[in-house]
Amino acid sequence: MDNQRDTTDRFLPRFDAAGLVIAIVVDADTQALLMVAHMNEEAIEATRATGQAHFWSRSRGALWRKGETSGNGLTLVEMRVDCDQDALLLRVKPAGPACHTGRRSCFYRRVEGDGRLTFLADDAQQG
């Protein structure tokens, strides 16, 4: 275990072999879980510099700012790091739906015991 990351006051993200950390994104006002994405060093720096959430797209192999095409950006309120610095929590103010489906959250379905998915009524598609 790397105790330095557990006790330091320095931000020392522990990137995986692909140079990424998990970023959990929640609404700063409601605490609702909005999405999970990945960030590399460039995405972290862009987010800190601009106050707008940036992520690394594994499928496109490119940096992207949330909302650059939809207008539904995420304004950073606070960035937190977990104890061993391999996951980030972004508390944000969303400018619209966080999910590409138009829903408030990417987590709009519950997995039932039999494996079926139930759509949650409290996160209906917007627009």
Image: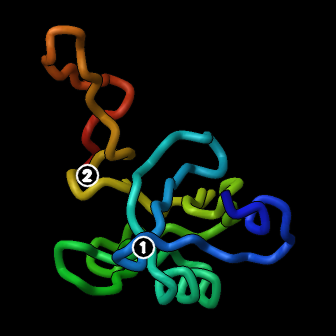
In the depicted structure, whether residue 11 falls above or below residue 24: below
Q: Position of residue 26 (x, y in %)?
A: 55, 50
At mark 1, the secondary structure is loop
Q: Position of residue 78 (x, y in %)?
A: 70, 64
Q: Which residue is mark 1?
A: 20
Tell me the number on the disc at residue 102: 2
Colour scheme: rainbow
How many circles with numbers are drawn on the protein?
2
Q: Residue at x 23, y 25 (%)?
A: 119
What amino acid is found at the position of numbered circle 2 in the picture?
Answer: Gly
Q: Is residue 92 visible?
A: no
What amino acid is found at the position of numbered circle 1 in the picture?
Answer: Leu
Residue at far front of view: 1
Measured Cα–Cα span from mark 1 to mark 2: 26 Å
Give the position of the N terminus as an image quadrant.
bottom right
- Mark 1 surroundings within 10 Å by alpha-carbon count, few (fewer than 14), some (14 through 19), many (20 or more): many
* Tag in front: 1 or 2: 1
